Amino acid sequence: MSVFSHLDSVIGKKGAAYVVLIDPDRKNEDSLESCVDSANQSGVDALFVGGSLMMDGKCTERVKQIKQASDIPVIFFPGGVGQLNSYYDAMLFMSVISGRNPHYLIGEQVIAAPMVKDLGIETIPTGYMLMDGGAGSTVEFMSGTRPIPMNRPDIAVAHALAGQYLGMKLIYLEAGSGAKESVSESVIEAVTHNLDIPVIVGGGIRNGQIASEKVKAGASIIVTGTVIEENSNLMSEITDAVHWKE
Ligand code: 1GP
């Protein structure tokens, strides 16, 4: 079964899927093992691995370590083509469709494509939309794009629809890692009411209750990163909240 089909069937059976984001950067060196252990025990549906900025050269080594320690699908969440390697089960083949920076709309993808083909990694076409989470995210800086204001669901809907019509299989509503304000329920509702494809929501989700509100608003996949780096015990609580059909 492809990784995309796995996620799709989890969404169908359990109501929504829960994904833990692991940043394979130096700052998580010490917590990597315990984080993967907790994911193995908490019923997490997939791991997103990647980050906007790597502060050392051991990213590939850490992805290998994650892959070897878990049977959960490991999905590349690309911060850049330099993080590509053979240990991922699939990748979000993303375009930053909320921005107008050609390098992140199509440039990185063209550089990556021949390597992706050579490595044989499953690709999941994903329209990535940066929303303003109030914290000036690393993604905003690194991608050189402006986030969509959170009080403009109409702009969010127009971008998400354009992504769907371009053939994206997923839309990612991102408030940015460590966002003060997660993607609002009104934005999620507006986008999901207009779309036929699943919507991922991430950035600033800090507990099961917040995750549950996002799912009730229409999110099909919930992503948490920061909160798990701080306290990996929260994974079970968030898994239970996201898997509301179980
Ligand atoms: C994934 O960037 C998010 O979409 C993760 O955000 O680190 O705030 O959970 P947090």
Image (spheres, grey):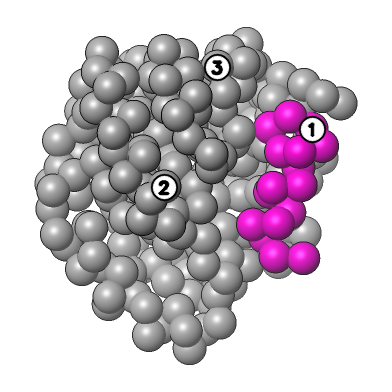
- Could you tell whether 39 is left or right of 149 in the image? right
Q: Are marks 1 and 3 in contact (CB under 8 Å)?
A: no
Residue hosting label 2: 164
Quadrant position of the C terminus in the picture: top right
Report the residue at 45% width, 29% height from top: 194
Q: CA distance from mark 1 to mark 2?
A: 24 Å
Mark 1 or mark 2, which is nearer to you?
A: 2
Labelled disc at residue 217: 3
Residue hosting label 1: 14
Q: Is residue 190 magenta?
A: no
Q: CA distance from mark 2 to mark 3?
A: 19 Å
Asked whether residue 101 appears in the rendered view, the answer is yes
Q: CA distance from mark 1 to mark 3?
A: 16 Å
Is 110 above or below relative to 1? below
Looking at the image, is mark 1 or mark 2 earlier in the sequence? 1
Report the residue at 79% width, 32% height from top: 14
Looking at the image, is mark 2 or mark 3 earlier in the sequence? 2
- Could you tell whether 217 is left or right of 35 in the image? left
Identify residue type, mark 1.
Answer: Lys
Q: What range of the chain is rendered magenta?
A: 1-16
Labelled disc at residue 159: none
Identify residue type, mark 2.
Answer: Gln
Report the residue at 27% width, 47% height from top: 97
